[in-house]
Amino acid sequence: MKKVRKAIIPAAGFGTRMLPATKAIPKEMITLIDKPVIQYAVEEAVSSGIETIVLITSKHKKSIEDHFDKNFELEEILKKGGKEKELEKILELANCCEIVSIRQKEQRGLGDAVYCAKNIIGDEPFAVILPDDVMLSKEPVIGQLIECYNKVEKSVVALQEVQMEDVSKYGIVSVKEKIEERLFLLDDMVEKPKENPPSTYAIIGRYVLDSNVMKNIGEITPGALGEIQLTDAIKKEAISSKVFGYLFKGERYDCGNVNGYLDAIINFALERDDLRDYLVQIIKNKFL
């Protein structure tokens, strides 16, 4: 069985839910405390053993590429200023793993964005990490999925149970069989069902996929608005082979909208020893 060594991080969208902040700044570069949102996705991948990350960007996203590149002038300034901790952080960022950038020339759906990386992925299994979904967990979520993939040797998608009134916001899976406490064999998935959802398990932005899924993307027909959906390629794999869903351990925050972003700031700050007491004191002074 081939090792999961590569991850795709799609980052070509306009980020309209976060306007006006995203008018000139990529949504993935909005700062969550002291790091841009996309850095959390990269760090999650690296801590899960990923060796190569493929960033799918667009012509307005050069700052993402620059963020993970070397900056010799800044490094020299930090050296001369004796700012060793700051220097260590940016050197670690530039050397964390191999990062490749590919431009999606037209926004034709998530499936199309993933397909842009087909030549780099080749015939290997691969991870997909949607950077809007920022995870707070002791064990990296994509690492949890890789562990499942190594066990079942089939595609695995991350699941989260949602309220019935929220199912129309997500891709919802149909469970064929419960394999373990958190692991399910799937037989179908429905994108944003308006009624009669097959379950309350939603697909969240983490995937570990067999190379056949990449082949499926190249064969599926574009849907509404000419978009190619990753979900359709995974459904095809569920029919021809097997696809599993894993109810991941951890908390997910949708940083693609203001409410989720604010929620993430508070919860990530509360997890940090250097910020927790300060945040609690701010809240006490304001409301108590």
Image: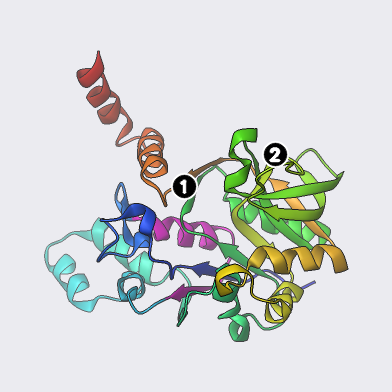
Residue 159 in the image, given as x and y percentages of width and height? 67, 47
* Residue 241 visible in image: no
Q: Nearer the viewer, residue 163 or 206?
A: 163
Residue 235 in the image, given as x and y percentages of width and height? 76, 63
Q: Residue under circle 1?
A: 254
Q: Report the disc number at residue 188.
A: none
Which residue in the rendered view is the most extreme toward the bottom?
119
Residue 268 in the image, given as x and y percentages of width and height? 40, 40
- Amino acid type shown at disc 2: Thr
Residue 227 in the image, given as x and y percentages of width and height? 58, 72
The quarter holding residue 80 reads bottom left
Q: Quadrant of the N terminus?
A: bottom right
Asked if residue 264 is positioned above or below residue 57 in the image, the reply reads: above
Q: Residue under circle 2?
A: 200
Asked if residue 248 is positioned above or below residue 117 in the image, the reply reads: above
- Amino acid type shown at disc 1: Asp
Magenta span: 36-57
The residue at 55%/61% (across/down) is 129
Q: Is residue 183 left or right of residue 279?
A: right
Q: Is residue 21 left or right of residue 246?
A: left
Q: Earlier in the sequence, mark 2 or mark 1?
A: 2
Question: Which marked residue is nearer to the observer: mark 2 or mark 1?
Answer: 2
**Whole-number angstrom distance, CA of label 2 to CA of label 1:** 18 Å
